[in-house]
Image: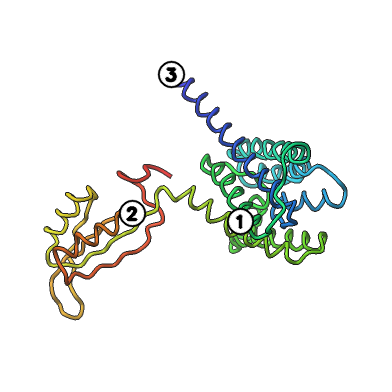
Amino acid sequence: MSKPEKKAFEYLKEAFIWIAGCLLYATAVNGFALPNSIAQSGMTGASVILHKLFGWPIGLVGFALNIPLLILMYIFISKGSLLKTLIVSAILSGALDLMTWLFKAYIPVYQGNPILAALICGVLQGAGLGIIMTTNATSGGTDIIGRLVHKAIPFISVGKVVMAADAIIVIAYMIVFRSFESGLYAIIVAFVSSRVIDSLLYGMANGKMLMIFTEKADEIANAIISSSRRGVSIIPAVGAYSRDNKNMLICVARKSEISGLLKTVKSIDEETFIIVSEANEVLGKGFRKSI
C-alpha cells in the first residue's frame, strides 16, 4: 500500500470511528436519557434545555453553541486540533437529530427503571466518546471551555472548569424539568461513562506491577520468565532494619497473570515480601506500543 493510500485509509478509518461513536452517544441520549428524564451535561445538556423551552433541534443547537467556542479555540489555543473537533461536532449534531427522528418514528425508546436507563446511557455514552478519543479527537463543548479558562488562569485545572460547567448545566436542567432526581441519575451516567472511557483508552494497557524482595532473585526471575515470558528487572536492595542484602525484582504483567505469578514466586521462596500495585498505563513489548 502506497503512502497516499495509507493516509486515505487512516482518514476513512477515523471517519468510521467518529460516525460510530457519535451514533452510540446519540442513541444513549435519545433512547435512554430523554425518555427517562435523565439530565445531560455539556453542550448536549444545554441543547436539551433549549429544545424543551423552544422546541429547537438538539443536534443543530449543540453545533451552533460549539461554533463560538471553536472560534475561541482557533484564536487562543490550537489550530491543529480544530479541524477534527469541528468535524466530530458536526457529525454528532447530525447523529443526535437523526436518532431523534428514528426513535420518534421507528425505534421504541426504553421507559422503565431510571437507574437501569442511567447505567445503559452511561455505557453507551462512554463507549461513544471513548472510541472517538482513541483518535485524539473530541466533540468540543465544555472541554474547550475548560482549556480556555485554564489558559487564562493557569492555576485552575481543566478538569475543575469542566466539572463546574457541567454542574451548572445539570442544575439548569433540573430547574427547567423540575426534577431533582434527574440530576442524581446524571451522576450515575457521568460515573459509568468515565469508567467506560478509561477502560477504552487505558484498559488494554492496564496491568499490575509486582515488587518482590527476596534472596533468591535469580531463581525466581528465571521461573517467571520461563512460566509467563514476562520480563523481570533485578535491583539490589538493603533492608533498613535488618541491614540484610537482598534483591528487589520488578515485573509488570496483566491482571489475569498475577495469580499464577504469585504461586510461582511463593513456590520458590515462602518468606519473600511482595507488593502488588496498579499500573494504569503500560507501554512496551507485550502491552500497548504507544498511547
Measured in 3D between alpha carbons, the distance from the residue under mark 3 to the one under mark 1, in whole angstroms, is 44 Å
Which residue does the numbered mark 3 point to in the structure image?
2
Q: In the image, is residue 132 above or below residue 40?
A: above
Q: Amino acid at mark 2?
A: Ser
Q: Position of residue 127 (x, y in %)?
A: 56, 46
Which residue does the numbered mark 1 point to in the structure image?
119
Q: Quadrant of the N terminus?
A: top left
**Figure disc tally:** 3
The answer to the question of whether label 3 and label 1 lie on touching residues, with beta carbons closer than 8 A, is no
The answer to the question of whether label 3 and label 2 lie on touching residues, with beta carbons closer than 8 A, is no
Q: Residues within 10 Å of mark 1 (few under 14, many from 20)?
A: many
Q: Amino acid at mark 3?
A: Ser
* Circle nearer the N terminus (3, 1): 3
Say left or right for 264 vs 37: left
Q: Residue furthest bottom?
A: 241
Q: Residues within 10 Å of mark 2 (few under 14, many from 20)?
A: few
Which residue does the numbered mark 2 point to in the structure image?
256
Secondary element type, mark 3? loop
Q: Residue at horizontal 69%, vertical 59%? A: 165
* Circle nearer the N terminus (3, 2): 3
